[in-house]
Image (tube, rainbow, N blue to C red):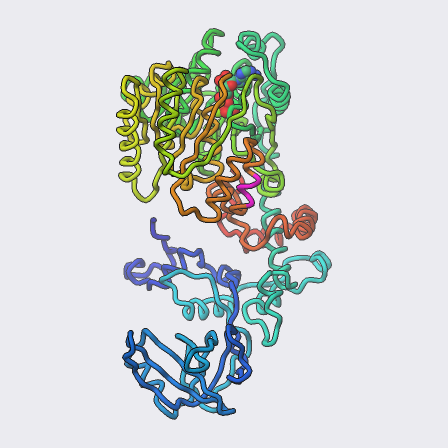
Amino acid sequence: MPEVSSSPAKASATDAKTSKSAPQKAMERLGLLRDIDLALHLPLRYEDETRLTPVRLAREGDTVQCEGIVTECRIEQRGRRQLIVRIEDEAGDELLLRFIHFYPSHQKTCGVGQRLRVRGELRGGFFGREMVHPSFRAVDEDTPLAQSLTPVYPTSASLPQAYLRKAVAAGLRRADLAELLPPGSVPRQLPALREALDFLHHPPPRLGLAQLEDHSHPAWQRLKFEELLAQQLSQLQAQRERARLKAPALCARPGGLHEQLLAALPFGLTGAQQRVAEEIAQNLARPQPMHRLLQGDVGAGKTVVAALAAAVAIDAGWQCALMAPTEILAEQHFRKLVGWLEPLGLKVAWLTGSVKGKARQKMIDAVADGSAQLVIGTHAVIEDKVSFKKLGLAIIDEQHRFGVAQRLALRKKLASQALEPHLLMMSATPIPRTLAMTYFADLDVSTIDELPPGRTPIVTKVFADEKRLNVIERIRDEVGDKGAQVYWVCPLIEESETLDLKNATETYAELSAALPGRLVGLLHGRMPPAEKAAVMAQFSAGAMSVLVATTVIEVGVDVPNASLMVIEHAERFGLSQLHQLRGRVGRGAKASVCVLLYTGPLSPTGKDRLRAMAETNDGFEIARRDLDIRGPGEFMGSRQSGAELLRFADLQEDAPLLKAARELAPRLLDQHPDAARRQVERWLGGKAEFLKA
Ligand code: ADP
Ligand code: MG
């Protein structure tokens, strides 16, 4: 990871990097840069050091603070070396302290006659009441108790709790927490921000901790409201900025290209495809940039809808770009779209990392002079060297695979003309409605909720890896008599690409040996693109029976004859990833099967994921369960959008606060624009940009 660079003001004559302590660096990595960031870094839980519990009254299993005089301190040699300290409290009750790890200094602190204040979990041991590894310190008779509960903050290994506590306390003192919201606008008389934060960092003693820890206390409510408001405000700002932008109005002409394409297709559109195509056409016809997500389950037929949108744009005299996350996927789009559009007289350009030298220059020139009407490719499409003559529509497939910066870059490809292109994003990972509403206030969503006719549902089976040989047996039957084609997917092990490859190559060898006379192929991410394309071509043409692949086939691969998929180490995949993979089969008329092989023991969430896969084929249901299992932040992925910006509020639980924030946001922005700006700055700092992409 790159170091967070320090601001110029902080960088003195000495090298800023070396002059920073490890805890300081750790704080930067946690995003604790400004006073306000520290003030908004809230405790995970609290420790009660405000009172002393007589040993006699403490119950087993309670975490308590006791005080007493040391009556014995010795090292015991039974089994492991241990330091045993015995103390006696005011009432004469004894407590044993047991340390398995200790330093000579411990012994010094715990000398006989010394008064100790200890805090830990009470256990009833063989030798009486005891604490194992309590926190402890030497005190006097009149050492005061803590005045408030002691906060325990989320932290990292290189950032000691005590250091962070001091930093947060200082940040909290210095931070500007002036009330920004007009009187009467905060719901339910929640406390002022300063008051709420002081309270949450240092709650008074004898408070019911439950309310604090489940975040239902009014002080917590205030924080969540603030956070939701900042998020709503920044979205509203982004929405208003976008509304001021201009885009070319692309009107579908009767008898135009898109009608010609429709007439030439080998199939008719489903009702859902017709509906979304119409929604998109209406959007393109307006002089404001479209910002639309087209979602539909794997295999729902998004590509043809994208092609129709492209036809409208090109017919109106503009260029269209289609960007896909992988070369394989881009190539499939290229083949399909060339097949559909070139007969209509359109010129389609192909731009990926593997197009090099003269060929590349030729493509770049064709894009620049406008002779290429449609450009299909990978990230290469947004490189600096590529500039469009008249980009009217940008389409991003599998949009969740791209970062915000890349989406912005694609939109900027038309900046020179004071116009923005229309943007169509496609995804097979449906976003549940509540999330769509909150994270993308101004994103329009079109949904294909119907599969093309003639598909047979996929049957999913879950087996332990011990059944592997039976599965291979089954494959032999399928590819032999029935001429079926099979995907065998090996997991991507993120820490080790080599291990990943080993896994795939071993399986490849195993299957090749088990299926004599059948062509087995191997496809992985690090193969040269030409080799990948050759393997894919053999599989697509039906010459290859089994394709062993890492997750490179996750998105977009379309071979209707493939009817069996095996995913090994299925427990290592995420739920939506499994669903994406499974969508590679079940594309033809053949009944398809997906076998999930797992290696135990399974974690509870691993079990939930595999069960969900076996129980449903419905992408929306899968997305809902994924959300349940992972929670919204992770579901969206931090690159996605403003997802990471919600730290405290929970969209479902805090629906009433969200409603209040949605109502207040436009009023604040109109009547108190300065307060609105400061509110966003306070909460989001530089991250607000993310919400605009
Ligand atoms: P996805 O939504 O996952 O991108 P595709 O666009 O790749 O799905 O479509 C999956 C397959 O279904 C393709 O082979 C496509 O040609 C075919 N298809 C799309 N729409 C229809 C339709 N209305 N009728 C029949 N087949 C269709
Ligand atoms: Mg697709």
Question: Percent x, y for residue 679?
Answer: 59, 54
Q: Nearer the viewer, residue 485 or 659?
A: 485
Q: Is residue 626 magenta?
A: yes
User: Is residue 205 among what the camera can see?
Assistant: yes
User: Is residue 142 among what the camera can see?
Assistant: no
Question: Percent x, y for residue 116?
Answer: 42, 85
The reply, left or right, for residue 542 in relation to residue 634 is: left
Question: Percent x, y for residue 27?
Answer: 41, 60
The quarter of the picture where residue 521 lies is top left
The quarter of the picture where residue 554 lies is top left
The reply, left or right, for residue 403 in relation to residue 500 is: right
Q: Nearer the viewer, residue 556 or 89?
A: 89
Q: Residue at x 45, y 59 (%)?
A: 32
The quarter of the picture where residue 255 lies is top right
Q: Is residue 619 magenta?
A: no
Picture mark count: 0
Q: Magenta residues: mostly which secondary structure?
A: helix
Q: Residue at x 64, y 63 (%)?
A: 217
Q: Residue at x 34, y 42 (%)?
A: 494
Vertical placement of residue 228 versus 326, above or below: below
Q: Which residues are magenta?
A: 624-628
Vertical placement of residue 188 versus 514, above or below: below
The reply, left or right, for residue 43 in relation to residue 100 is: right
Q: Nearer the viewer, residue 414 or 406?
A: 406
Vertical placement of residue 142 versus 290, above or below: below
Question: Percent x, y for residue 85?
Answer: 37, 84
